[in-house]
Amino acid sequence: MSNGNLVEIRDLHVDFPNPQGFTPAVRGISFSMGREKLGIVGESGSGKSVTGRALMRLLPEAARVRAGALRFDGTDILAASERQMRGLRGGRIGLIMQDPKYSLNPVMTVGAQIAEAWRAHNKGSKREARDAALTLLEQVKIRDPGRVLDSYPHEVSGGMGQRVMIAMMLAPNPDLLIADEPTSALDASVQAEILKLIEDLVSARGMGLMLISHDLPLVGRFCDRVVVMYAGQVMEELPARDLHRAQHAYTRGLLDCMPSLSQKRDRLPVLTRDAAWLEKRA
């Protein structure tokens, strides 16, 4: 794309059917991103994950999707053929899910699953795919990768399973990695290791990263920019380093609800919502 953006989203709407008609999940959001670390934050149900899945065209067929623009590196996602989308999904766009227990195939070894991802987007023999899988496990800093290669998902820990998921997504050497709550199912110490791993890999490979999260402090430390979503709309977009100086009442409310180890408070405030936040596109 001439403007250097990997992703361009303009006036995206996503509606899901209900017995009375349709329920809006995303209501006219717009943003773009390049090869950077972009955080998307907001409460559950704000439309964060739906936005990521719309970009990969992974929403249910019954969903109604429309947009002024929904593009990845110049490709019109809404007009692309299914063959084009197969080249993008898992190829140029990788998706790391929230919990590896539900994302990995329980009856296939770790090595077989990574090799399958590699062969889907690379030409090579089974032996070459297995060697590539071993190399990817080494890149995600798994100890004893040869043993893990022949293990089944239930034989590895949660943190190791998430490293396996990252290795699978890196197999085709994507341009964009969408990480949807990639550390929420992990212990705090393992979270830090996984985020450092993602950060190092994104920097080394020159990828873009879309990090979807509830954790504002984490996104503020980890990302370059932050998009704040509420009820399917973008409330605010700002540099991550300026997150503590956010202006919108919703972002301020989310920050104020965070507990602090340095500032003692008897009671955390409850977020007060304003109907006017949604009037612009209701």
Image (spheres, helix red, strand yellow):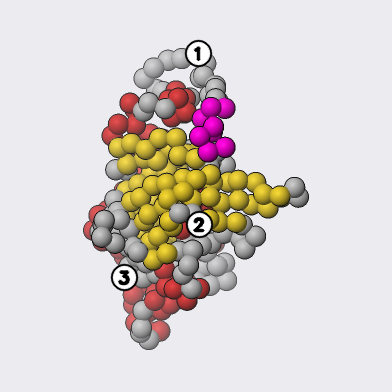
The amino acid pointed to by label 3 is Thr
Q: Earlier in the sequence, mark 3 or mark 1?
A: 3
Q: Is residue 219 left or right of residue 27?
A: left
In which quadrant of the rendered image does the N terminus lie? bottom left
The x, y position of residue 41, in whole percent, is 44, 40
Q: Is residue 157 left or right of residue 92?
A: right
**Residue 102 occupies quadrant:** bottom right
Q: Determine contact: label 2, label 1, CB under 8 Å.
A: no
Of residue 242 and residue 201, the one placed in the foreground of this image is: 242
**Secondary structure at numbered mark 3:** helix
Of residue 112 and residue 277, the one placed in the foreground of this image is: 277
Q: Is residue 270 magenta?
A: no
Where is mark 1, residue-wise? 266
Q: CA distance from mark 2 to mark 1?
A: 42 Å
Q: CA distance from mark 2 to mark 3?
A: 31 Å
**Secondary structure at numbered mark 1:** loop
Eyeballing the image, is 42 above or below 136?
A: above
Where is mark 3, residue-wise? 135
The amino acid pointed to by label 1 is Asp
Q: Determine contact: label 3, label 1, CB under 8 Å.
A: no
Residue 156 marker: none
